[in-house]
Amino acid sequence: MEQKKRVLSCIQPTGDMHFGNYFGAVKNWVDLQAEYECFYGVVNYHAMTMPYDSKKLVHNTWELIFNLMATGLKTETLFIQSLVPEHAELCWIFNCFTSYGQLSRMTQFKDKSKQSEESSEGFISAGLLNYPVLQAADILIYRADFVPVGDDQDQHLELARNIAQRFNNQAGKEYLILPKALHTEVPRVMSTAEPTRKMSKSAGEKHYINIFAEPDRIRKQIRSAVTDAGDTPAGEMSPGVKNLFSLLKACEKHDIYDALMNNYNAGNLKYVDLKEAVAEALVEISNPFRQRKAEINANKKEVKEQVKASSVEIRKRAQETIREVQELSGLLNVKF
Ligand code: ADP
């Protein structure tokens, strides 16, 4: 039997999970489990690169694990980054194979350092600069073939390949696998309160819809979605209406989508019908999530043990890579 290709993806523990995260990333992860050998990391080391609260970080790390499990990720695919400290060791080694100039040109570094500077009295951590090196370690340590990423991450993935190539050149061996991006078409979900900006936690509560919210809250948020802000040129679909249609499509409600789109094209779409359809579709998707989350919440201790155990299993692969990397790079090691 041909061995399954490996997929690696990571997510930062930064709070609630919303439908933007779900349709834009997590749903894809759930689907990939059927075809690939998957590793999904909750990357708490990465969450330290911006100002943060340590108690909240612990809480958010577990909460994200529970949320990912409730959406359908298998426990054995999940690990917590700090339970695999080899990521940090490999990051150091890779720092020495990374061009400082290339790092300082990363778009995300430029954006986030500006944010960091504004929010914390001018403090920009070196961790923020080295973030993509740690990301390269996350990927290369599992010898991943594919990384499902959005276009905004292409620059980081290119850096990971550059690091791998430079390491392999020095080692005189094609040891590290050069990972490829796995681009899947995913919707960019917009805020229903302000449909010209993307749905995001960082913009505040009204700008995102929690996937575990009670049905009434979901309905209320969709009912109050902005449809026409009055500044859309004639003949064009407004961003708010576009976003609602896109949500309906993401929920795979193709028949209702077609019927309502026909109404729109005929000029007789009632926004209330579109909102009703979107709200019900989102509630339907969220029902099993809420149910599974309640089950997990009732068994937190056991679930935590399971995830610690899967992290230990996954760590074995990382340890093997570290051992080989140490050998290839001239470092002394004590065999694990
Ligand atoms: P947030 O902006 O809410 O903090 P994150 O930056 O933590 O979200 O994103 C986690 C994942 O969810 C990333 O893979 C990102 O591409 C995806 N994602 C976040 N917001 C959206 C959105 N509005 N539409 C589509 N995908 C999104």
Image (cartoon, helix red, strand yellow):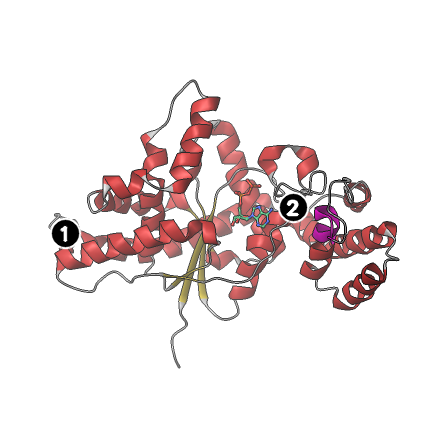
- In reply to whether residue 242 is colored magenta, the answer given is yes
Residue that badge 1 annotates: 329
| Residue depicted at 31% across the width and 38% down the height | 104
Q: Tell me which corner region of the image, top left, top right, bottom left or bottom right, holds residue 147.
A: bottom left
Q: Residues within 10 Å of mark 2 (few under 14, many from 20)?
A: many
Q: Outermost residue toward the top?
A: 121
| Residue depicted at 41% across the width and 72% down the height | 4
Q: Position of residue 80 (x, y in %)?
A: 44, 46
Foreground mark, 2 or 1, reads 2
Pointer 2 residue Cβ closer than 8 Å to ligand 1: yes
Q: Position of residue 63 (x, y in %)?
A: 57, 41
Task: Classify 146 as above or below 15.
Answer: below
- Badge 2 marks a residue whose secondary structure is loop
Q: Residues within 10 Å of mark 1 (few under 14, many from 20)?
A: few
Task: Classify 227 as above or below 36.
Answer: above
- Badge 1 marks a residue whose secondary structure is loop
Predominant SS along the magenta part: helix
Does 48 sit left or right of 25 as displayed?
left
Q: Outermost residue toward the front?
A: 234
Q: Amino acid at mark 1?
A: Ser
Q: Position of residue 113 (x, y in %)?
A: 40, 31
* Distance from the alpha carbon under mark 2 to that under mark 1: 46 Å
Residue that badge 2 annotates: 190
Q: Outermost residue toward the bottom?
A: 1
Q: Nearer the viewer, residue 217 or 192?
A: 192
Q: For the magenta stretch, what is the residue range?
A: 236-244
